[in-house]
Image (cartoon, grey):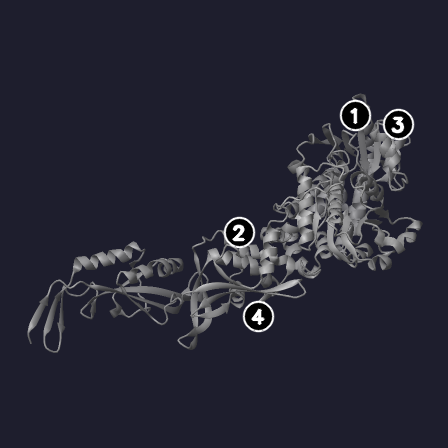
Amino acid sequence: MPERLIEDLQPRPRLWLGSVEFSAFEPRNGRMQRYIQHRAALAFGYAGEYVSSGRAATLVLHRANETLRITRQLDAEKRLRDRLQTLGFKVATRQSKALPESAGDIFELPNDSAWLRFILNELPGLREQGWEIEVSDDFAFDLTPVEAWYATIDESPERDWFDLELGIVVNGERLSLLPILLNLLRTHPELLNPALLAKRRDDDQMLVPIHGYQQGKQRLMQVALPYGRLKPVLATLGDFYLRDPEGTSETRIRLATPDATRLGALQGLPLQWQGGERMRHLAERLRSVGTTSATPPAGLNATLRPYQLEGLSWMQALRELEVGGILADDMGLGKTLQTLAHLLCEKQAGRLDRPSMVVMPTSLIPNWQDEAARFAPDLKVAALQGAGRKKLFGELHRFDVLLTTYALLPKDIETLRAQPLHVLILDEGQFIKTPGSKAAQAACSLNARQRLCLSGTPLENHLGELWSLFHFLLPGWLGDSKHFNQQYRVPIEKHGDRARLLHLNARIRPFLLRRSKEQVATELPAKTEIVQWVELNEAQRDVYETVRLAMDSKVRAEINRKGVARSQIIILEALLKLRQVCCDLRLVNNATAPAKGSTSGKLDSLMNMLEELLGEGRRVLIFSQFTSMLGLIEGQLQQRGIRYALLTGATRDRRAPVKAFQEGALQIFLISLKAGGVGLNLTAADTVIHYDPWWNPAAEHQATDRAYRIGQEKPVFVYKLITRGTVEEKIQRLQAEKSALAGGVLDGREGGDWRLQDDDIDALFAPLPGRKKAASARDAER
C-alpha cells in the first residue's frame, strides 16, 4: 500500500484520571489499613492513536488504503508534559492499579487537597486549551457542579418561631443541606470548632457526597463546597447538630424568634431567598440593636451621659422587637436612671396603657421611690409593701409603675398575675438565679409585653445562674436546664472549652448590654486596690491549727464517703470556722480566748490603720460578712470614743445612717456585706476596707461600688485585710478563678475553668507556715 509521511501533525494531549481503593498492612499499628490512590495518565494523540514517552519517534499507522508514517512532535510533547508538572504533578514512582498501563505516562499529586484544587481550579483551563479529559467511573474527584445556593424561611403565625431550610441546586434539583451536613458532622466533628474552622481558607473546598438525579437516574454524586460558604452555614446550623447528634431526615430546622440573629451570618452569601422578609428584617435590627440613638424623653430631670443614652436606645430597640434583655452595667453607672428614662419614653409614646412593674430587694424600694420622684416625676409610682399594700390591689391599673419585692411577689402572685403589665423589670436580677425558687417561679408567671433584668452581677457562681435569667427573659431559647448544662455549662466550667464559650457569647450578645466603669465612665477617679497582709497572733495560731486538724479530718471523711461534689456543705462549714478564727477568736464557738491580751491580730491591725486614716481626714467604709464581727469592731471604736454609722440587715431606717455619713457627720461606716451590697450611694467615702474576704468577688465588687460610682470626685483606695498563710490567702486564688469565669461569659473573654478539686482541698486546709513539720507528724499519726 502507498505510504504517506506526515511531519507537522501536532499532538493532542489526553489526561486520563482514575482512583483505586485497596488494603495494606500498616506496620505502625499492626493492622490492615484502607487506602485510596489517585493517578493521572498523560498520552499524546496522533490521528486517533495515543502514545506515551516510551514509544518510537515515528508512529506507523496502517489504514485501509494507505500507511501513515507520522513524525512525533517531541518538543511539543515535552511542553505539554512540562505544563502538567507546573501544576504540581510528579512522575509516579509507585505502581498503581488506578489506571491501565496503556493509559500513558503515570503522574500523581502529593495529597487529596492538591487533587481537589486541581480539579476545581486547573482542570477547566486544560479543557479550554484543547486537552482531552477522560475520567474513570471510580475516580474519587468526579464532581457534580453546584448551580446555586438557596435559603427558605417559613414564618409561624404565632411569631415565636420560624423554619429555616438551606440548600443547594444540583442538576436542577433542590437539595437541603441539613441532612447532608448532619451526616458530615458525625464524621468531622471538628467542623463545629470555630477556632479550627477559622484556620481553613475560604477558597478551600470540602468534598460532600449527595444522593441526586443525573440523566433521570438516582446516583451517588459528589459536590465541592467552599469553606467560605460552609463557615456561616455551619455557624447557623451547628446548634441543631448539638441538639440532635444522631442526625435527622428533616430538611428544615425550627428556630426561636430571637435566633433570627443567626441569619446575619448568611447575609453575605449569594443565596436565593424565599420568604422570611420579616425574620430577615428582625435579624438586621438585632444586629444593629441600640445603634439608632433614642431621644431622651421630655420631663426627664437628668442629662444622660452618652453610654446612658446608648442604654436607653438599646432598651427601646428591644421593646420594638418584642424581646427582653439584661442591662448588666457595673454598679454606679445609673441602671435605675436608664430604666426610668425607658419607662418615661413608653408613657410619652402612649404605649404605657397598662402599668409596668419593678421587682427588687426590699432595701431598694426607698431608692426607687426617691429616684423616680427626682428624675421622672411624671410617672405615677406605687410601692406595694407593708400591710397597707392590699388596699392598692383594686386600683393597680391607675399607676404607671408598681414597685414590689422578691419576698412579697410570691405572696401576692394571684393578684399580680391577673394584672397585665407593659414592662416587667427585675432589679438585682441575680435574685432569681435559682430557677426553682418561689420568687423565680412567680416572676416567670407574670404577663408582660417586655421583660428586662438589671444586674451588675448576672453571673456570680456558675453559668446555671445565667440560664435562669434567660429562662425568665426568653423561655426555652437556651434550651431546658439539662440541655444547657450538657452543651455549655459542663464544657465551659469543667473543660475550659473556649469554642463553647464563644458560641454562648454569640447567642447572648444582642440581649446583654454590659459596660464597666473603665469602659464608659472616664470621668471617674482612679481606684487603687491594696492587699494589706496581717499576721495571726499566737493565740489565734494555736486555735487555727486545732480547728484545722479537726476540720481536715471531718472533711476528708465526708469526701471519702460522698465525693467532693456532694460534700460542699461540710467543706463550707469547715472554711467558715477557719475564717472566723482569722477574724477574731471570739467568733468561734468553744474557742478559748486568752484571759489577757488580744483576741485578733487583724482587729489590732485595723485599729492601727483607722488611727492613721482618720488622722488624714479619710472617710472609711468597713465591710464584713459577719455582723458579729462588726459588733466587735463597734466595741473597739466605742472604747476610743470614735463615732460611726452602722448598717446591717437589722437596720430599719437605712436612710438615716447614709445621710449622716454622706453629710460628713461621721467618718466611719460599718456595713454588713449582705445588707450593703445593693442600694447605697456613698460617694462621700474615699476608702473601702474589706475586713474578711470570701470566694465570691462579685459581692466584694458590689460593696466597693458603694463608694466608687458616678458622683465620686476623689480617688478611692480599697484595702483587703488578709491573714498571711491562712485559708484567706488561698481564697484569693479562688476569687481570681471565679472572676475569670464571669468575665469570659459577660465580657466575651476566654472563660476560667473553676472547679474544686483535691489539690484545692489540700491548699485550703494546709497547715500554717512554720508549723508544717508538727502538722505532718500529727497527720501521719491520724
Which residue ends up furthest to the top in the rendered image? 615
Q: Which badge, 1 or 4, is on the more N-terminal residue?
A: 4
Side (left or right) of 417 relative to 497: right
Q: Which badge, 1 or 2, is on the more N-terminal residue?
A: 2
Q: Secondary structure at mark 4?
A: loop
Q: Nearer the viewer, residue 624 or 745?
A: 745
The residue mark sitting in front, 1 or 4, is 4
Which part of the image, by quadrant, shows the N terminus? bottom left
Can residue 655 be seen at all in this image of the molecule?
A: yes
Q: Secondary structure at mark 3?
A: loop
Q: Nearer the viewer, residue 88 or 508?
A: 508
Callout 4: 10 Å neighbours few (<14), some, many (20+)?
few
Q: Amino acid at mark 1?
A: Arg
Can residue 93 be seen at all in this image of the molecule?
A: no
Seen in the picture, residue 620 relative to 774 is either above or below; the reply is above
Q: Point out which mark residue 618 bears.
A: 1
Seen in the picture, residue 79 relative to 725 is either above or below; the reply is below
Residue at mark 3 to residue at mark 1: CA–CA distance: 14 Å
Residue at mark 1 to residue at mark 2: CA–CA distance: 51 Å
Residue at mark 2 to residue at mark 4: CA–CA distance: 28 Å
Side (left or right) of 20 relative to 462: left
Relative image position of residue 338 (x, y in whole percent): 73, 43
Q: Which badge, 3 or 2, is on the more N-terminal residue?
A: 2
Q: Nearer the viewer, residue 559 or 271?
A: 271
Q: Amino acid at mark 4?
A: Glu
Contact (Cβ within 8 Å) of mark 1 with mark 4:
no
Q: Which badge, 3 or 1, is on the more N-terminal residue?
A: 1
Q: Secondary structure at mark 1?
A: loop
Relative image position of residue 406 (x, y in whole percent): 83, 51
Q: Residue beneath label 3, please?
A: 643
The residue mark sitting in front, 3 or 4, is 4
